[in-house]
């Protein structure tokens, strides 16, 4: 069948686009399902200052458009659809966008992850206007400002400590008084004079019209409400990998991240994975791009060996 591709790539963030570039340059026929949010998480942030090669930083959307154009130059075809179902049982692997079936000899999954959100209207309204889920990406914009971080795990400690490099003060807001964070990370954060811990609080609302001006809190015990002033609000309550549609087809860990078994190959032969759907540690554009490159090289070698 002529329309069986060498590689289908699911996802169009840095991992998917880099995989498409490498697979295209290896002369493989490539289709990328970019989903209804092409470009992934980077398109929801502002300036990216930590992706090498851009002295003055680059807008997230622009970076992703450049990556896509670069992959297209080497023959990658992009389809703006979400893959909702897969069948990796046969020699040719099948993926489905709704009822439409597509086939390929190999698959690269690069569907990324979504930051877990609190589910507040104000969080959506002020997203990228002071609300962020990535201190490494956006911390610099809060030089000499006050910020709040919500969460009680290692990410929250790490984000809070990173933010003290810029902010004059960092509130650490947590819904309990026990922490999931490792002792060493918690100790470090607690020893940092710029960080003030506020425990047993739920975030009721992020305050501000066009930018963040504060946070409304409610004590989880007494129900008492209070407000703090802050110009930035960082979510650090975990991530959710976008892998639900893969359940039963490839092995996932307890949190839903794809397990890579042999280099970048998953538990399904000929199905590779890279980026934030695999990685809950680094979660950077550059590391995702690197893993996309690995997946494409491994896919090419696997196809060659078949
Ligand atoms: P995590 O360990 O799952 O912690 C999530 C935190 O967010 C918990 O404190 C949780 O509170 C809180 N939370 C979840 N949903 C919430 C909600 N709706 N409202 C308020 N709070 C909420 O996630 P993580 O910190 O992102 O870490 C993920 C993994 O990466 C962990 O294995 C961690 O060790 C690892 N990590 C390691 C490093 C490092 O070693 N440098 C850095 C970052 C992450 P409860 O505790 O009450 O459930």
Image: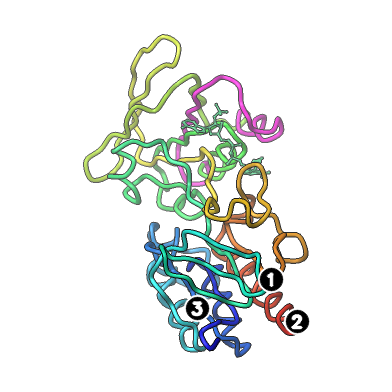
**What is the magenta range?**
164-190
- Left or right of residue 288: residue 100: left
**Mark 3 crowdedness (10 Å alpha carbons): few <14, some 14-19, many ≥20:** many
Residue in view at x 47 percent, y 42 percent = 116
Q: Are marks 1 and 2 in contact (CB under 8 Å)?
A: yes
Identify the residue at horizontal 58%, vertical 78% (top origin).
7
Question: Closer to the camera, 60 or 254?
Answer: 254
Separation of residues labelled 1 and 2 (CA atoms): 10 Å
Mark 2 or 3 closer to N-term? 3
- Quick check: 129 above or below 273? above
Q: Position of residue 54 (x, y in %)?
A: 48, 73
Tell which tag, 2 or 3, sits nearer the viewer. Answer: 2
Q: Earlier in the sequence, mark 1 or mark 3?
A: 3
Residue marked by disc 1? 270
| Disc 1/disc 3 C-alpha distance (Å) | 16 Å
**Residue picked out by circle 2:** 306
């Amino acid at each position: 069948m002529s329309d069986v591709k060498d590689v289908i790539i699911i996802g169009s963030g840095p991992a998917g686009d880099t995989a498409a570039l490498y697979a295209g340059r290896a002369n493989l026929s490539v289709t990328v399902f970019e989903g209804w949010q092409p470009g992934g998480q980077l398109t929801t942030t502002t300036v990216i200052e930590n992706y090498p090669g851009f002295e003055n930083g680059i807008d997230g959307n622009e970076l992703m458009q450049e990556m896509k154009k670069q992959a297209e130059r080497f023959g990658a075809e992009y389809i703006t659809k979400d893959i909702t179902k897969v069948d990796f049982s046969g020699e040719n692997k099948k993926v489905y966008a709704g009822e439409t079936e597509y086939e390929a000899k190999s698959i690269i999954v690069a569907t990324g992850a979504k930051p877990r959100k609190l589910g507040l209207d104000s969080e959506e309204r002020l997203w990228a206007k002071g609300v962020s889920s990535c201190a490494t990406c956006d911390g610099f914009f809060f030089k000499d400002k006050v910020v709040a971080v919500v969460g009680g795990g290692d990410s929250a400690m790490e984000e809070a400590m990173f933010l003290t490099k810029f902010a004059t003060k960092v509130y650490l807001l947590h819904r309990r008084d026990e922490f999931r964070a490792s002792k060493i990370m918690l100790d470090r954060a607690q020893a940092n004079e710029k960080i003030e811990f506020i425990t047993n609080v739920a975030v009721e609302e992020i305050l501000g019209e066009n930018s963040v001006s504060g946070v409304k809190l409610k004590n989880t015990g007494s129900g008492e409400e209070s407000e703090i002033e802050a110009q930035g609000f960082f979510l650090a309550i975990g991530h959710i990998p976008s892998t639900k549609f893969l359940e039963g087809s490839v092995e996932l860990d307890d949190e839903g991240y794809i397990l890579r078994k042999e280099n970048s190959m998953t538990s399904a032969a000929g199905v590779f994975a890279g980026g934030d759907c695999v990685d809950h540690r680094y979660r950077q554009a550059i590391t995702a791009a690197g893993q996309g490159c690995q997946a494409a090289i491994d896919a090419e070698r696997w196809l060659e060996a078949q």
